[in-house]
Image (tube, coloured by chain):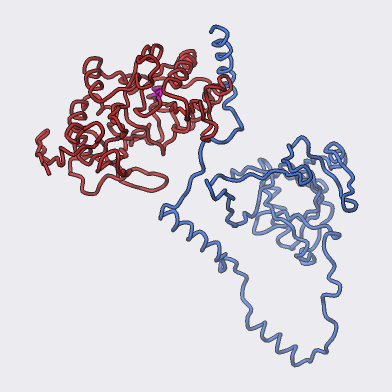
Chain colours: A blue, B red
Amino acid sequence: MAVQGMWSGTISFSLVAIPVHVVKAVKPGRITFRTLHSKDYSPLARRMFCPKQGEIVPPDEIVRGYEISPDKFIPVTDEELESVSPERSRTIEIIEFIDMNEVDPIYFDHPYYLVPSKGGEKAYRLLALVMSRTNRAGLARFVLAEREYLVAVKSSEGALTLFTLHYSEEVLSDDGIAPKEGKIEAKEKSRMEKNIENMMADFDPGKYADERRGKVMELLKKKMKENVPVEAPAGEEEEGEGPPDLVAALEDIMRDMKKNR
Amino acid sequence: MSRKVVEIAGRRFALSNLEKELYPSHGFTKGQVLEYYRRMTEFILPHLKDRALTLKRYPDGVEKDFFFEKRCPLHHPPWVETAEVFHKGERMTACLVNNPETLLWVENLASLELHVPLARTSSPETPDAMVFDLDPGEQATILDCARVALILRELLTRLELASYPKTSGQKGLHVFVPLNFQGATFDDTKKFSKAVAVIMQKNYPDLVTAKMAKEQRKGKVFINWSQNDASKTMICVYSLRAREKPFVSFPLEWGELEHPAGQGNPEGLQVMYSEAVSRAEKMGDLFREVLVKKQKLPHL
């Protein structure tokens, strides 16, 4: 499988070490739009604006501040943040195995696939097979892009998937959500159970599609046929003078030409 | 209404409205336009060949409305060669001016100006030349373009690239750098020409701008590098222009830019239809090298 991984390393526990790399498991189907200037269809750029000075602020004048009260901040530098960031790790160290049935889906954050790297195929298959039979998952700590995540490694149809999990302090309490008032009659309860039983089906997500997305795509196709595309004015962008080799050669020649004039 | 049936290569067709003045202030008629293109056929055809033609038609002359036509008119005679092309994602049939009779047929439609892309229809993504379109802003003239063209030429020469200038037939100049090799891409020609334009602007800020914005062009020459694009067309060399006077987009020798005729009169560099014919017949096709010379862009 020739996929570019976003992380590579090993899954390990006791004496087992399986080389893997991490790839995305979902690609959101959202259609994104650029924002354009209605006058000439130039794509718009975001800039940091200082309302006090009424000016756009260049990147080298931007710092971070933690707001302790309105208009009162603790400035924090990149170096300071870096000094408390976890080090990139090369392992997904499984601390314990858990039963997947015990994990409330509310903890699931983001799914990834684990792809076996060279030499890891057999151990990968073995782990995937055993975990899927018992519906177990390995719980691990894992550093991805400067943040340490709690993750669950589980098996789905032969492939290992990795879910980043929310920390418990991130999950909001459900206190006060479940109503306590009102007596429930046995008859009502059994009628509800029957209703649900009648509507049971196998979970088949393929049956459902994002209808709005389909309609937006259709609209775009139709407009494409009617030849409504508009073009941004060319030649306005300032950044980048060109290929460095060429620019250097041109600068040399220019210097020489002006000297000999 | 005058009609005249002509026969070229055994193909008969009718030319119409020959006495209509298409350049009224100059008394230049449609018959004379047809005669101009007939005499220039051997020079202009190689430059039109296998390129998707954009017609710019002036049915009632240069002082009245015109329209562009990228699609080959549906009623075209069977001997007009065509090609299927994509323009901005849309498929269309374009005329190819591949023979003398097509040229006359197109002119009979009063397409005074003939615009073609920098690539041939068989390889629409492969430019066979890179172009610098020198366009004078307000208060600048073709003589300023000539100064810019000479600096540009020296720069290109030092990069071991030969270049060839022509008048646009309007106010500016076009400098062509022949490529004629398979690996050329618009990506490269755009990148290269832009880098050149930017460095020229940096070194000659009072004379050159690489920016499209009108207010930045006052008194300066805009080097329009963005013409190096598969979707853009350029006025074909030897085409008439639809201005008050019947000027031609005509190739020049570099010496003519070093010592422009006309004692400071910008029109001294312009070439009128009659002069175009006599010069071409005497000098041959000064733009011949643009079609054959093989050059590769360095430092990319």
| Front one among B66 and A73 | B66
| Front one among B70 and A17 | B70
B264 to B134, vertically: above or below: above
Please state the total of marks drawn on the protein image: 0
B100 magenta-colored:
no
User: From the viewer's perspective, is B122 left or right of B103?
Assistant: right
The answer, for residue B70, to whether it is visible in the render is no
B174 magenta-colored:
yes
Percent position of residue A55, x then y: 73, 41
Residue furthest front as drawn: B25
B63 to A36, vertically: above or below: above
Quadrant assignment for the N terminus of chain B: top left
The answer, for residue A200, to whether it is visible in the render is yes
Percent position of residue A175, x then y: 86, 72
The magenta region covers B173-179
Percent position of residue A97, x then y: 81, 57
Which secondary structure class fits the magenta region best? strand
Percent position of residue B133, x then y: 43, 28
User: From the viewer's perspective, is A163 left or right of B278?
Assistant: right
| Front one among B217 and A239 | B217
User: From the viewer's perspective, is B202 left or right of A139?
Assistant: left
Residue furthest top as drawn: A260
User: From the viewer's perspective, is B117 left or right of A159?
Assistant: left
User: What residue is rendered at 82% in x and 77% in y?
Assistant: A178
B150 to A144, vertically: above or below: above
User: What residue is rendered at 80% in x and 47% in y?
Assistant: A147
